Amino acid sequence: MATSKKPSKAVTPDTLLLSSEEPSLLYAQRELVRTNGIDFEAWWDEFKTGFINGKRDKATNYRTALWTKPKYSDITPSTSISGARTIEYWPDKDTLEDSYLLSGTTSDLIGGIMDIMRQKAIEAQASGKGSKPLLRGYPCIKLLFVSDEEVKGVKQIRCVGFTENVKIAAVSTGIKLLTTTEVGKWSNRIKTIFGDKEFVWSKGTSCLSYSGIVARLQGLEGYAYVKTQADGINLFTAMLDIFGHKPDMDGFNYSEKTNVSQFTKGQKETRLILNQKVKIPEKRPVVNCKFVSASLILDGLKKPIPLVRGKYAFDLSDVVLSN
């Protein structure tokens, strides 16, 4: 007696069927599309060395001396089925607050990294032509914070538009000669903002940076490790308030750190040096640092001028600023 067969499912012409004997074909196709035939790990090993054969000569403009050591972290979800790879890329492994998120095929990742390099080269070239103010020539106010564990934190802001040099003030439009009266105003402002309120810089594992044209013109382009975004904005806002400035909210960039192995809770490491136990503070402690003092740094003076100590402003009546 003949047995009847179940009708098979209709197969459309565009349906790709893989036999159980060849399940890897689809994977191979996806892998080829994802990698574009490029071994990313091998490329990265070549890239991170800085192209040591590229030197400044007639054949190339590449300057090996300007190379910074990069790093990346693969953060592709283990559950990803898209075929794309996602990485966090740092142009300089020692500057953790400056990272980029890249995703796509191997070619996309390499293209993104090279685009970042080109953009940074353009910015460096533009800054060399004077698009950035030469903040190094301006007076600088340094704020000192200390925790109960004796962990120190220092933030600084440039006094943009002021100089202690009479000749510079005479030939420069828009730059005022620094006077004791002006410095006295800053001293009282620091006392009110930081001293009277016992301002606390909450150091944490996240990074808040403040950058852009407005930040540069305000003399406060930089970053701080904080516990929350609000803590960081509060710190930068208080510093700008010394000069009566407001922050450019578009200039803030906040990033939470997932790798917190470099942070500690303020405890100090003990090392044995010449048979003596020495406590060495960790590089990035997570502590609350209270405002302690403020001082003014001038190029023409060997020692800083004290402005505020705790809740008290110094008497600046005998200070001579011009030269």
Image (cartoon, helix red, strand yellow):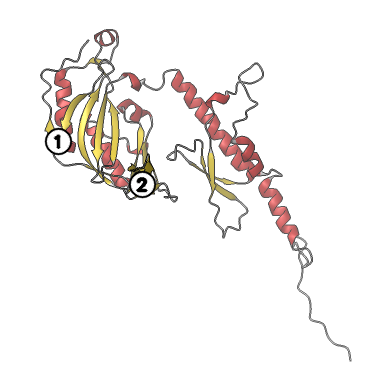
**Residue identified by numbered label 1:** 192
Q: Is residue 107 above or below residue 141?
A: below
Residue reaching furthest to the bottom? 1
Looking at the rendered structure, the secondary structure element under dot 2 is: strand
From the top left corner, tell me how far across and down residue 321 is, in percent: 19, 15
Total numbered circles? 2
Q: Is residue 182 above or below residue 312?
A: above
Quadrant of res 113: top right
Amino acid type at image mark 1: Thr
- Mark 1 or 2: in front is 2
Q: For residue 283, say whether it is visible.
A: no
Q: For residue 272, say whether it is visible.
A: yes
Tell me the number on the disc at residue 296.
none
Say few, some or many: other residues with alpha carbon within 10 Å of mark 2 (under 14 / 14 to 19 / 20 or more).
few
Residue reaching furthest to the right? 1
Quadrant of res 221: top left
Q: Is residue 192 above or below residue 29?
A: above
From the top left corner, tell me how far across and down residue 223 is, in percent: 36, 37
Q: Is residue 170 above or below residue 73?
A: above
- Residue at position x 27%, y 19% from top? 161
- Residue at position x 23%, y 23% from top? 304
Amino acid type at image mark 2: Glu
- Residue at position x 20%, y 33% from top? 293
Describe residue 85's horizontal placement relative to residue 100 as left or right. Answer: right
Describe residue 96's horizontal placement relative to residue 112 as left or right. Answer: left
Say few, some or many: other residues with alpha carbon within 10 Å of mark 1 (under 14 / 14 to 19 / 20 or more).
some
Tell me the number on the disc at residue 269.
2
> Distance from label 1 to label 2 (Cα)?
36 Å
Looking at the rendered structure, the secondary structure element under dot 1 is: helix
